[in-house]
């Protein structure tokens, strides 16, 4: 049965309203995925319509035809206000729409993803804002939908079960390469690693019946997104090769 949903988050960040606006309209590959917004024509990503375009204060995109089997309407609304004389920003983010099936599972997944995405936005604004980025995203094999799949990802990286958010770690990446990183986010559903040159995001989507995923936001000069994708896909496939 179709049912409306609304997910609301508010936060402050050490960035100006202009920097936040730039991040959510043009720097999206640095923290989410690459998207295009055309304020003059009112066209947003994925066929959306920009119902509010007021830089750097208000952005609303609305999609009437989501083309997703469990959703029929999607709207994202951002309100940005200055704080501390414009040196910082307050953001109110509202994700709303209609789920047409599996409402509880869809809402739980969307709500938890929202927290991780907005955390990554703050990490980008704090550490990498405005830097060119190579973006790659990939998904695990069918075996990564298992109930304990995300635990296997943590073990493959070399993380202990009790390695907490904020810890400085050395993890095992593609081809056994060691990566020095900060665990900037960790809960049973998601893991965020920040290196000197990248944000690495691990998604335990097995909790919602989908494969585990990874997104790589690589700010290293000359980074190749195809090489990042291939390397991390091989790594992820290897995690589940014996499953």
Image (cartoon, rainbow, N blue to C red):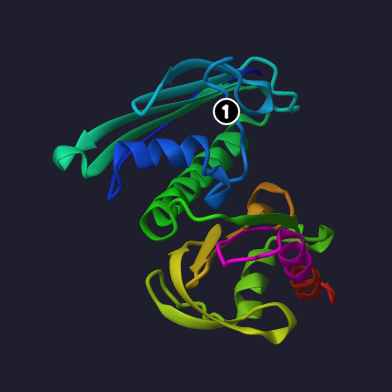
Q: Nearer the viewer, residue 1 or 126?
A: 126
Residue furthest to the left: 85
Residue furthest to the front: 222
Q: Which residues are magenta?
A: 213-233
Number of marks present in the image shown? 1
Snapshot quadrant of residue 98: top right
Residue 239 spot, x, y in % from top left: 75, 74
Q: Nearer the viewer, residue 25 or 9?
A: 25
Crowd band around label 1 with a 10 angstrom C-alpha radius: few (<14), some (14–19), many (20+): some
| Left or right of 243, for residue 161 | left
Taking the image as drawn, is residue 148 in sight? no
Residue 11 vs 177, above or below: the answer is above
Identity of the residue drawn at 52% across and 38% down:
26
| Left or right of 102, for residue 26 | left
Residue 192 spot, x, y in % from top left: 51, 63
Which quadrant is the N terminus positioned in? top right
Based on the picture, tell me whether residue 134 belongs to the magenta stretch: no
Identity of the residue drawn at 61% across and 32% down:
36
Snapshot quadrant of residue 49: top right
Taking the image as drawn, is residue 88 in sight? yes
Residue 198 spot, x, y in % from top left: 54, 66
| Left or right of 105, for residue 192 | left
Based on the picture, tell me whether residue 215 belongs to the magenta stretch: yes
- Reading the image, the residue beneath label 1 is 37
């Amino acid at each position: 049965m179709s049912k409306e949903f609304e997910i609301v988050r508010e936060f402050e960040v050490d960035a100006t309203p202009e920097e936040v606006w730039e991040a959510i309209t043009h720097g999206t590959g640095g923290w989410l995925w690459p998207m295009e917004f055309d304020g003059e024509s009112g066209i947003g990503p994925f066929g959306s319509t920009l119902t509010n375009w007021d830089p750097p204060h208000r952005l609303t995109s609305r999609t009437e035809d989501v083309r997703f089997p469990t959703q029929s309407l999607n709207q994202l609304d951002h309100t940005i206000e200055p704080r501390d004389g414009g040196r910082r920003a307050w953001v109110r983010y509202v994700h709303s729409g209609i789920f047409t099936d599996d409402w509880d599972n869809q809402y739980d997944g969307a709500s938890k993803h929202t927290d991780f995405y907005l955390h990554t936005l703050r990490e980008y604004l704090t550490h990498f804002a405005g830097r060119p980025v190579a973006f790659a995203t990939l998904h695990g094999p069918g075996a990564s939908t298992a109930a304990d799949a995300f635990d296997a990802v943590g073990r493959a990286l070399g993380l202990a079960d009790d390695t907490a958010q904020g810890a400085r770690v050395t993890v095992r990446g593609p081809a056994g390469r060691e990566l020095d990183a900060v665990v900037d986010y960790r809960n049973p559903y998601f893991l965020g690693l920040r290196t000197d040159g990248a944000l690495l995001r691990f998604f335990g989507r097995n909790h919602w019946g989908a494969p585990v995923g990874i997104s790589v936001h690589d700010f290293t000069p000359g980074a190749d997104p195809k090489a990042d994708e291939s390397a991390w896909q091989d790594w992820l496939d290897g995690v589940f090769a014996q499953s």
